[in-house]
Amino acid sequence: MLRSMTAYGRARRTTSLGRLLVEIQSVNRRFLEVHVSLPSGMGSLDADTRAVVAEHLHRGHVSVRINWVMNEGSQNEVHPNLVVAKQLWDAQASLAKSLGVPLSPDQAMSWLMTQNGVFEVQPNERMVEDFKESIQSLLKEALDDLIQVKDAEGFELQKDILSRLSLIESWMKEIQKLAPSAIDKYRQKLMDRLREFAEGDLTQDERVLKELVIYTDRVDVSEEITRFLHHISHFRELILNKEIASGKKCDFLIQELMRETNTCGSKSGSLEVSHLVVQIKGELERIREQVQNVE
C-alpha cells in the first residue's frame, strides 16, 4: 500500500496541567527530517519527541508543534536573569544620557519589567514529568490522525498509479505485437536496397544472411519488453501489498521502466512504435511525479 508524505494531524486535551495541543504537519522530503517546537522550559523532551515520530514515519519533513496553556494554579519557578536585566538597564541609562532626557528610577524599572528575557519561567520537575507523560500520549494520537490522512491520500495515489500502469502496460503489449513485423519490414527494405547494388540471389549469400541475423538481433526488443512487463508486475505487487511501500523502491522501478522504454524506442525504426514509446514515457513521468509524494 502507498502512504502519502503530505498530511496534517492534530490532537488536543485538557489536563490538570492545562490545555495541551499537538499539531503535526508533514511535507515531501527525500529523508526523514523532524523539527520540534516545544513550550518554554520543555526542551529536554525534544529527543523523546523525535524518537516517537521516527517510530511511525519514514520520510518527509515533519514539523511538530506543541502548545500549552497552563492553568492558573500551575506552579512554575520564576527566576530573574540578572545579566540581561543589568545590560538592559545600562543601555537604557546610556540612551537617556546621550539624548539628554532625564530618567527616573521608577520609569526605568517599569520599562525593564516589560522586557523579554528579564525573567525566566521554568516548570518545576514534577510538572515536567507530568507534561512528558501527557504529551507522549497526545503525540501518538496526533500521529494516528496524521497517518489516517496519509493513508487516505496514499489510497488515491495508488488508484491513479494503478490505472496508469495498466495503460502503459497495454501500450507496451502493442509494441510487442508490432515488433516482429517491424523487423520483417526492415529486413525486406534492406534486401531491396542491396539488390540495387548487387546481382544474383542475395538470400543465398552467406555473408548477407549473417549480417541480417546480427542486425535483427540488435533491433530485437523482446528482452526489453519482457523486463518491462516484469517491472510492471513488480510495481503492482509492491503497492498492493499490505506493507507500506517504499517511495525509494517505487522511484527505482520508474527508472528501470524508463530505461527499457528508451531502449525500445532507440532500437525500433517503426513510427507506430515510436509514437507508443512517447506515450509511455509521458505516463511514466506522471507516475514519477506521484511517487515523489510517497513515503
Image (cartoon, grey):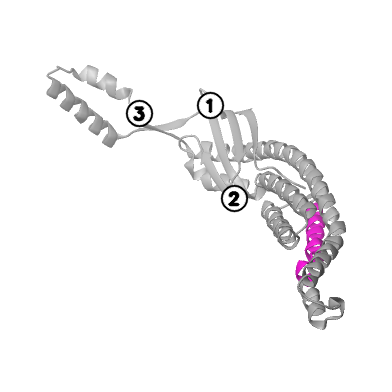
Q: Residue at x 22, y 28 (%)?
A: 89
- Which of the two residues, 102 or 198, is positioned nearer the viewer here? 198
Q: Is residue 232 left or right of residue 147?
A: right
The percent position of residue 186, horizontal first and vertical second, equals: 80, 64
Q: Is residue 213 left or right of residue 23?
A: right
Q: Secondary structure at mark 3?
A: loop
Instruction: State which tag comes first along the sequence, 1 or 2.
Output: 2
**82 shown above or below 293:** above
The answer, for residue 241, to whether it is visible in the render is: no
Distance of label 1 from label 2 (alpha carbons): 35 Å
Distance of label 2 from label 3 (alpha carbons): 38 Å
Instruction: State which tag comes first along the sequence, 2 or 3.
Output: 2
- Which of the two residues, 157 or 39, is positioned nearer the viewer here? 157
Distance of label 1 from label 3 (alpha carbons): 19 Å
The answer, for residue 138, to whether it is visible in the render is: yes
- Write down the region rendered in magenta: 216-238
To which residue does mark 3 refer? 116
Queried whether the magenta region covers residue 84, the answer comes back as no
Q: Amino acid at mark 1?
A: Val
The percent position of residue 108, horizontal first and vertical second, equals: 23, 21
To which residue does mark 2 refer? 30
To which residue does mark 1 refer? 69
Q: Nearer the viewer, mark 2 or mark 3?
A: 2
- The mark total stands at 3
Q: Residue at x 17, y 18 (%)?
A: 103
- Which of the two residues, 294 or 171, is positioned nearer the viewer here? 171
Q: Residue at x 83, y 81 (%)?
A: 205
In the image, farthest residue toward the bottom? 206
Q: Amino acid at mark 3?
A: Asn
Q: Is residue 184 left or right of residue 282?
A: right
Q: Secondary structure at mark 1?
A: strand
Q: Amino acid at mark 2?
A: Arg
